[in-house]
Amino acid sequence: MEERMRRNVGKMDRLFRGLSALALLACAWAAPLPLAARLGALGLTGLYLLFTALSGTCLGYALIGRSTCPLPRG
């Protein structure tokens, strides 16, 4: 049975990641840089941030054992 990744990105972190992703994707579209630089640096980073904002999980946080989610009560 496959183990599902737990959410490790809190609400404020998700909000900032989403806003940052939108800004990076807009820059990837409009920046006066070569296409490879726009897609490689800005586009891929923006897509990763958008994915983590929507899914609530960050592979980097999981690798270092970090979480920005609130602690469970109880």
Image (cartoon, rainbow, N blue to C red):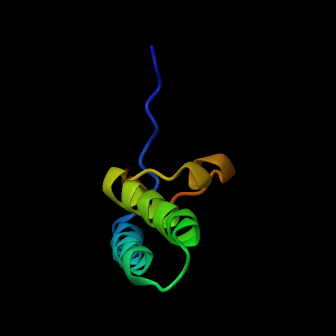
Of 32 and 52, nearer the camera is 32
* Residue 11 figure quarter: bottom left
Residue sitting at 56 percent across and 48 percent down?
A: 59
* Outermost residue, top side: 1
* Residue 15 figure quarter: bottom left
Residue sitting at 50 percent across and 60 percent down?
A: 44
Residue sitting at 50 percent across and 65 percent down?
A: 39
43, above or below 32, in the image: above
* Outermost residue, bottom side: 32
Of 25 and 30, nearer the camera is 30
41 to the left or right of 3: right
Q: Residue 40 at x, y = what percent?
A: 56, 63
Q: Quadrant of the N terminus?
A: top left
* Outermost residue, front side: 34
Count of numbered marks: 0
Q: Residue 65 at x, y = what percent?
A: 63, 51
Q: Residue 46 at x, y = what percent?
A: 44, 66
Of 49 and 64, nearer the camera is 49
Q: Residue 37 at x, y = what percent?
A: 58, 71
Of 19 and 40, nearer the camera is 40
